[in-house]
Image (cartoon, rainbow, N blue to C red):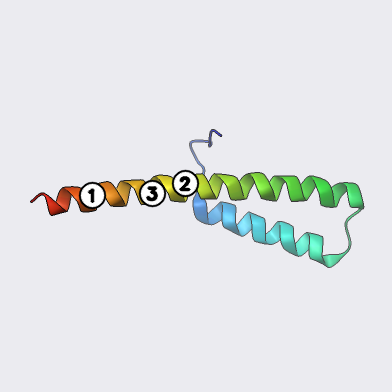
Amino acid sequence: MAKKPSWKYEQTVDRVEEILAEIESGELELSEVVSQFAVAVESLQQCEDFLAQQREQVELLLENLGDI
């Protein structure tokens, strides 16, 4: 799943929170709820991928630190 060059974790989390608030408001049509839910799921997957990459990087740095 490719992320845009300007992609930011914090902004993506904020957007997911906005989407959830919109869904919880009860003001959206069902089709909009499903559409927004799909966007939220995709955004959360991007966040999960980002965090996994960051965790790998930290583990590598810690491993290298142990070699010093």
First along the sequence among labels 3 and 1? 3
Q: Secondary structure at mark 2?
A: helix
Q: Amino acid at mark 1?
A: Leu
Residue 50: mark: 2
Residue 46: mark: none
Q: Residue at 44% across / 48% down in the picture?
A: 52
Q: Residue at 53% across / 49% down in the picture?
A: 47
Q: Amino acid at mark 3?
A: Gln
Q: Is residue 26 left or right of residue 14?
A: right
Instruction: Check contact, mark 3 vs mark 2: CB within 8 A.
Output: yes
Q: Which residue is mark 3?
A: 54
Mark 2 crowd level (few <14, some 14–19, many ≥20, 10 Å Cα): some
First along the sequence among labels 1 and 2? 2
Q: Position of residue 36 (x, y in %)?
A: 77, 49
Quadrant (top left, top right, bottom left, bottom right) of the N terminus: top right
Q: Which residue is mark 1?
A: 61
Q: Secondary structure at mark 3?
A: helix
Q: Is residue 17 left or right of residue 57?
A: right
Q: Amino acid at mark 2?
A: Phe
Instruction: Check contact, mark 3 vs mark 1: CB within 8 A.
Output: no
Q: 21 or 53: which is nearer to us?
A: 53
Q: Position of residue 24 (x, y in %)?
A: 80, 65
**Is residue 58 placed above or below 20 in the rendered structure?**
above
Q: Position of residue 5 (x, y in %)?
A: 48, 36
Q: Secondary structure at mark 1?
A: helix
